Amino acid sequence: MSENTERSVVVRRTAAGRFTATNPRGGTVDFSTSSGDGPDTAFTPVELLLAAIGGCTAADVDAATGRHSEPDTFTVTVSGDKISDHLGNRMTGLTVAFTVTFPDGEGAERARTVLPRAVRTSHERLCTVSRTVETGTPVTTTVNGAGQGAGRGGRGFGAP
C-alpha cells in the first residue's frame, strides 16, 4: 500500500492584502501582506514560514521527549533576517532556538538526555519544512485560465 505523498493548500484573496489558506480538511489560517510593523496582527507569509519551521521541528521534538516526561515549558523561537539582494527577496540566518524544561524525576531526566538528539534528528532528517528549505527545493509556478475576468471581457495577466 503506497502513501499519498501530495500535500496542498488553497489560498484565496479575501480583501486587499488579506488572504485565507485552506487545507483539504477544511482548516483555515488568515494572513496579510502587511510589513508586520503596523497594527495589523495577522501573520505575514514570512512569519508563516517561520511558524512552519518551528511547528514542524517542535512536533518532532515533543514526540521524542514527551513520551518520557511532560515538559514544564516548551518554546521554540524561529528568527532570521529578511533581505533583498541580487538573488531577490529571501530570508537568511535562520535560527531555531529551543527552550524546554522538565520537572524533577526519572522520566524527566531521560527527556533531558533525549532532547539534544531529538533536536538534531529533527533538523538533520525529520522536519519536512526545514529540510525543504535547506535543500533548496525548486518551486514551479503556473497561471491557470490566463487571468481572464468572468463576463467582463477584460485582459488579465497572460492574456494576448
Image (cartoon, rainbow, N blue to C red):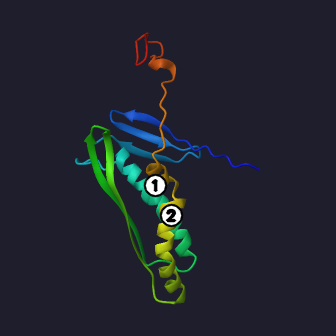
Judge from the rendering whether residue 19 lies leftward or rightward of residue 121; answer left or right. left
Query: For numbered disc 2, what is the local secondary structure?
Result: helix
Q: Position of residue 87 (x, y in %)?
A: 32, 38
Q: Position of residue 146 (x, y in %)?
A: 47, 18
Residue furthest to the left in view is 38
Q: Nearer the viewer, residue 97 or 45?
A: 97
Q: Which residue is painted at 47% across and 64% down in the image?
A: 58
Work out whether 147 lies above or below 110: above
Q: Which residue is painted at 49% across and 49% down in the image?
A: 132
List the residue tagged with mark 2: 122
Work out whether 69 lies above or below 52: below
Q: Which residue is painted at 33% across and 36% down in the image?
A: 17
Q: Nearer the viewer, residue 77 or 137?
A: 137
Q: Amino acid at mark 2?
A: Ser
Identify the image quadrant of the C terminus.
top left
Q: Position of residue 93 (x, y in %)?
A: 32, 55
List the residue tagged with mark 1: 130
Tag 1 or tag 2, which sits nearer the N-term?
2
Q: Amino acid at mark 1?
A: Ser
